[in-house]
Image (cartoon, helix red, strand yellow):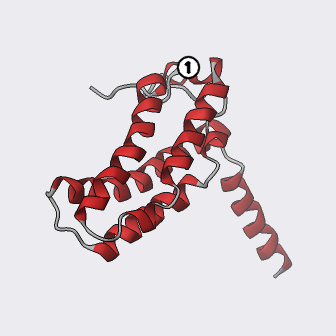
Amino acid sequence: MRYLIAALVLVSSSSVLGDPIKDAVEARQGYFIMLSTNMHPLSAMAKGELDYDEAAAAMYGSNIEVLSQYTLPMHFPKGSSTGELGKATGAKAKIWTNFEDFNQKFADFQKAAEGAGESVKGGKNNVGPVVQKIGKTCKACHDEYRVKND
């Protein structure tokens, strides 16, 4: 039994202690997938492409709010840009030459997401301003630090 436990600890720690660059890239890509799966329906509601559903809108807004509180910049270690890895990671090397600005842009996103779950309640007309405010911060970072997918 002791050996089984030791083997399980060894196997689980080796997956946790894998390649730190690869792990960071996977973590941030997973984060952005979660963010987009909440932003897209809100955007669709704002555009009238999806019927307004207050409970769903509040859930998406709250999820974005919670996601904004995660310390995402920790998943941008040096050496994890598209140029360095030779494959699209979405990250421009420029992030690390201006990491203070990169962090500020994330802080701007955090501020924009504050109260999103409550702000989208009360009708479709309340969704658009929230999506625009959050989207503006996403765009500011993407324009500066994200490799465009062609």
The residue at the far left in this view is 49
Q: Quadrant of residue 38?
A: bottom left
Q: Residue at x 39, y 33 (%)?
A: 139
The residue at the far bottom in this view is 1
The residue at the far right in this view is 2
Q: Quadrant of residue 102?
A: top right
Residue annotated with mark 1: 93
Where is 130 relative to 20, above or below? below
Residue flagged by tag 1: what amino acid is it?
Ala
Q: Residue at x 67, y 27 (%)?
A: 100
Q: Is residue 105 visible?
A: yes
Q: Is residue 89 visible?
A: no
**Residue 31: image location, x then y, percent:** 50, 51
| Left or right of 18 on screen, residue 93 | left
| Residue closer to the observer: 104 or 94 | 104
**Residue 28: image location, x then y, percent:** 53, 45
**Residue 39: image location, x then y, percent:** 35, 54
**Which of the image's four quarters has the N terminus?**
bottom right
